Amino acid sequence: MSKTPDILCIGAVLWDIIGRHDHEMERGHDRPGRITRVPGGVAMNIAMALQAYGMTPALLTAIGRDAEGDELLRACAGMGMVTDHIHRPDDLPTDRYMAIEGRNGLIAAIADAHSLEQAGDAILAPMTSALSGWTGLVALDGNLTVDLLTQIAADAAFAKADLRLAPASPGKAERLRPFLAHPTATLYVNLEEAGLLLDTTFTDSATAATALLAQGLHRALVTNGAEAASLAMGNKLLTFTPPKVQVKRITGAGDTFMAAHISAEAKGATPEAALQNAMTATATYISGDSY
């Protein structure tokens, strides 16, 4: 019998191919390092972190029926994810993400989530069947198309859900604009993504989070690398500076922050404690040595 999920993770579940060099890199550099292939994608990264915190996530995504897809599905199930609701198209390959990282951060990355985009609303079919009437937590990422995200923002099936949104990358931040007026949406963005959403530039997280609320957003969490992160909701504004650590990995840091915050709140943490927990968990993650 399938486990009952605590949260739905909707979006990219794919293979992460990450090349890392231990020193600083610049464009055009050819350096020795390590290359890993691990399960990834924003929805998957969030789900893995949530599972590590004791929660049971269900995945709503598209995974191809190729050998890579079968392997990925086994990996998801092996980590305790609920995989019953995953869409398995016959004619689409399993998606991939490729990144190069140095000590100075992300050098370049390419996200190939075309199968997820082409699958469209087929990934949401369980919301009208097995998961009909869901009012719990939903983690949603910006790898979905603008049309599908717009559909979800207006969909009665999600109207009472506790929506948690991640843009996936700065290039996809603008896709989440339909949720600025959603009554339950919490948006997790960095400073650059906040600026892209509102077509402006911010110098600090507090100003950015406040500006997002002014546009009608229910709740905003804005990070700014090693600088202060802020949460804005109602009349409350919280700002905390993360611990100082040596950065050893980047990919998945934002997903770790989001998952740690969701998990802390699910366990009853106060807004202050949940934000501090998320920053501490992210500092531990980025200072770690392996994916």
Image (cartoon, grey):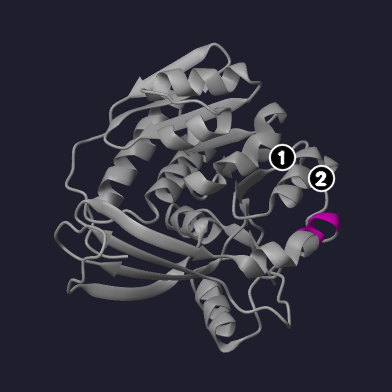
Secondary structure of residue under mark 1:
loop
Q: Is residue 205 left or right of residue 23?
A: right
Between 52 and 185, the one nearer to me in the picture? 185
Residue 236 x, y percent position in the rendering: 50, 14
Q: Residue furthest top?
A: 235
At horizontal 44% and vertical 18% (from top left) the residue drawn is 207
Dot label at residue 157: 2
Residue type, mark 2 in image: Ala
**How many other residues sit within 10 Å of disc 1, few (<14), some (14-19) or many (≥20)?**
some
Near mark 2 (Cα within 10 A), the count class, few <14, some 14-19 or many ≥20, is some
Q: Is residue 147 above or below residue 199?
A: below
Q: Residue at x 56, y 73 (%)?
A: 77
Residue ranking furthest to the front: 28
Frontmost residue, 128 versus 6: 128
13 horizontally vs 158: left or right: left
> Over which residues does the magenta segment extend?
123-128
- Could you tell whether 271 is left or right of 73 in the image? left
Q: Is residue 127 magenta?
A: yes
Label ID, residue 161: 1
Among the 4 quarters of the image, the one containing residue 117:
bottom right
Residue 284 rendering spot, x and y as whole percentages: 26, 48
Quadrant where the image shows the N terminus: bottom right
Can residue 240 be seen in this snapshot? yes
Q: Secondary structure at mark 2?
A: helix
Asked whether the beta carbons under mark 1 and mark 2 sit within 8 Å of each other, the answer is yes
Residue at far bottom of view? 67
Answer whether residue 125 is magenta in the image. yes
Q: Is residue 144 above or below residue 180?
A: below
